[in-house]
Amino acid sequence: MSSDITLVGRLTAPPELRFAKTGTPWATFSIAVNRGHDDKKETAFFDCKCFGALAENIAELPKGTRVIADGYTVQENWETKEGQKRSKHVVMVNEAGPSIRFEPVVADGVVARPPTKMATAEPEQPVLAAMDDEAPF
C-alpha cells in the first residue's frame, strides 16, 4: 500500500549516492519538515530514496538545502542478524528540487534574485503587418 506525498523541508545531511550492480544510480537522504509556530513547533523527519538522473542531481545538494520532494510512501521490511523482523516507511521520490521561496537561485556561483520593483517602461506594442484587401487564408 502506498500514499502520494509532497514534502517541503531541509536536507538533514548530504544525500548519499550509490550504484546498484547494474550501474543504476540511487540516493538516500532525509528531509526535516517543520510544522507549527513558536512554542508549538514540531519537526518530522522523512527517509527518502530516488533513482537514476534524479539521484545523481539530488546528490549535488548540500546539507540544509530547502527542497521540495514529490513521491509515494512504501513500507520496507527486513530481518536483522539476530532474526528480528523490522520495517519502516520510506518516501520513494519521483520528482525533487531546491525550493526558492525564501532563498535566491544559485547557478554556477551566480545569485539570481527577483526584481525588487516593477519596471516602469511601457511594454512594446506588437507591430501588425499591413494587410491587403484579400483574406489571409
Image (tube, rainbow, N blue to C red):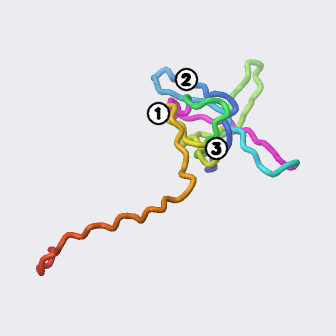
Instruction: Tell me which residue sits at (47%, 33%) in the image.
Output: 53
Mark 3 secondary-structure assignment: strand
Percent coordinates x, y for residue 20 in the rendering? 51, 23
- The residue where tag 1 is placed is 53
Identify whether 77 is placed above or below 80. Answer: below
User: What whole-number distance in Å separates the C-alpha atoms at marks 1 and 3?
Assistant: 20 Å
Q: Sequence order check: which comes first, mark 1 or mark 3? A: 1
Identify whether 125 is placed above or below 86. Answer: below
Q: Which mark is nearer the camera, 2 or 3? A: 2
Within 10 Å of disc 2 (Cα), the crowding (few <14, some 14-19, many 20+) is some
Which amino acid type corresponds to the residue marked 3 in the rendered image? Thr
Instruction: Tell me which residue sits at (68%, 33%) in the image.
Output: 77
Within 10 Å of disc 3 (Cα), the crowding (few <14, some 14-19, many 20+) is some
Within 10 Å of disc 1 (Cα), the crowding (few <14, some 14-19, many 20+) is few
49 magenta-colored: yes
Q: Sequence order check: which comes first, mark 2 or mark 3? A: 2
Residue 23 shows in this picture: yes
- The residue where tag 2 is placed is 18
Q: How many labels were placed on the picture?
A: 3
Magenta segment = 40-58
96 magenta-colored: no
- The residue where tag 3 is placed is 73
